[in-house]
Amino acid sequence: MKVMKFGGTSVGKPQRMKEVAKLITADAESKIVVLSALSGTTNALIEISNSLAAGDRNAAKQQIDALEQHYQNFVQELLSKDAAIAKAKLVLAEHFEFLTIILKISFSEALNKDILAQGELLSTKLFCLYLEEQILIMCC
């Protein structure tokens, strides 16, 4: 079994994520695939955390909104089927709702770790949706 790790640049644009999908599905060998957050996401999440730590909830909200828009655009380029796009929008809603909720609670180091984890969670879920969409396209 192979373990394959892809950094943020490798999955930072929809076309790059599609290339990773081709690479990992090129043969039948079992693989464990590990993805970093999309390029720029970790830095954006750090900025959100820093704004929250400084008590600047307005700046954090603007940063969250900008990051969400980036992901909305990413999904539109990554996926082509309405069903997959709808699932992706639910994923985004879940994660950005979490980021919006944190605007209302006290900042802590534990919360900081939860904020930073969102990048890898998002990239992995969107990648899975892309793979699912490709399987459906090939089967139908």
Image: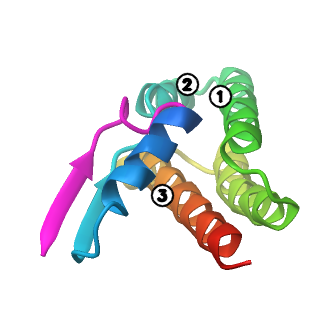
Mark 2 vs 1, N-terminal side: 2
The reply to whether dot 3 and dot 2 touch (C-beta < 8 Å) is no
Answer with mark 3 or mark 2, whichever residue precedes in sequence: 2
Say which of 24 and 46 sits in front. 24
x then y, percent, for residue 62? 74, 24
Q: Specify the quadrant that holds the N terminus.
A: bottom left
Residue 90 place in picture, x, y as percent? 77, 63
- Callout 2 amino acid: Ser
| Residue at the disc numbered 1 | 60
Residue 123: x and y in percent read: 49, 50
> Which residue, given by chain and number where applicable, does mark 2 sit on?
51
Under mark 3, the amino acid is Leu
Which range is magenta?
1-13
Separation of marks 3 and 1 at Cα, in angstroms: 20 Å
Instruction: Give the distance between the C-alpha atoms of the residues marked 3 and 2, in whole angstroms.
Output: 22 Å
Q: Are marks 2 and 1 in contact (CB under 8 Å)?
A: yes
Give the vertical position of 31 relative to 58 (above or below).
Answer: below
Q: Is residue 16 above or below residue 90?
A: above
118 to 32, vertically: above or below = above
- Using a 10 Å C-alpha cutoff, classify the residue at mark 1 as few (fewer than 14 neighbours), some (14 to 19) or many (20 or more): many
Tell me the mark number nearer the camera, choosing from 3 and 1: 3
Asked whether residue 48 appears in the rendered view, the answer is yes
